[in-house]
Amino acid sequence: MIYTFPGGANGAAPYTGLIADAKGNLYGTTTTGVYGEGGPVFELVKGPKNTWTEQVLYTDIRGSYAGLVRDKAGNSYGTSEFYGPDFDGAVFEVTP
């Protein structure tokens, strides 16, 4: 186990796999976060002695069950089940 989600703004209930960048940092989403809000898009940065630190890149991704993809510029894309004016879903982008 390299990281345990604390809940709240840092997210809980990850559902999909992770993607990595060239530096070995890991990226993903969680399905829930702060009560009444969605989970974050997060980055896990490897530190000394195999410690990992979470950086929240974006919050309120509601129901991200499909994971992320990255382009060559480092932008991440994913889907959210419960987003938009009628909660019909959305595609999102997170830029570095």
Image (spheres, helix red, strand yellow):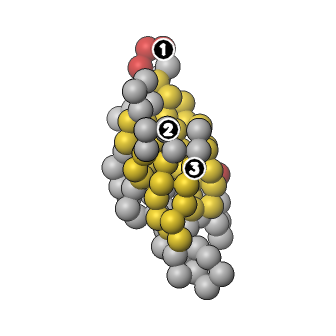
Q: Position of residue 32 (x, y in %)?
A: 53, 62
Q: Which residue is mark 3?
A: 94
Write down the quadrant of residue 53 in the picture: top right
The residue depicted at 41 percent of the width and 20 percent of the height is: 50
What label sits on residue 48 in the rendered view?
1
Examine the image and state in which quarter residue 60 appears.
Answer: bottom right
Nearer the camera: disc 2 or disc 1: 2
Q: Would residue 32 be found to the left or right of residue 84 on screen?
A: left
Q: Is residue 42 left or right of residue 71?
A: right
Of the residues under marks 2 and 3, which one precedes in the sequence?
A: 2
Residue 26 in view here: yes
Give the residue drawn at x 55%, y 36%: 54
In the displayed image of the protein, which residue is found farthest to the front? 72
Q: Is disc 2 surrounded by few (<14), some (14 to 19) or many (20+) residues within 10 Å?
A: few
Determine whether the residue tagged by mark 1 lies in a helix, strand or loop. Answer: helix
In this rendering, which labeled residue sits more in front, label 2 or label 3? Answer: 2
Q: CA distance from mark 2 to mark 3?
A: 11 Å
Q: Which mark is residue 73?
A: 2
Closer to the N terminus: mark 2 or mark 1?
1
Whole-percent x, y for residue 91 in the image: 51, 65
Asked if the residues shown at circle 2 and circle 1 are in contact, with their CB atoms under 8 angstroms apart, the answer is no
Please state which of the two labelled residues, at mark 1 or mark 3, is closer to the viewer.
Answer: 3
The spot of residue 45 in percent (x, y) is 50, 28
Residue sitting at x 52%, y 75%: 89
Q: CA distance from mark 1 to mark 3?
A: 27 Å
Along the viewing direction, whichever of 95 and 40 lies nearer the viewer: 95
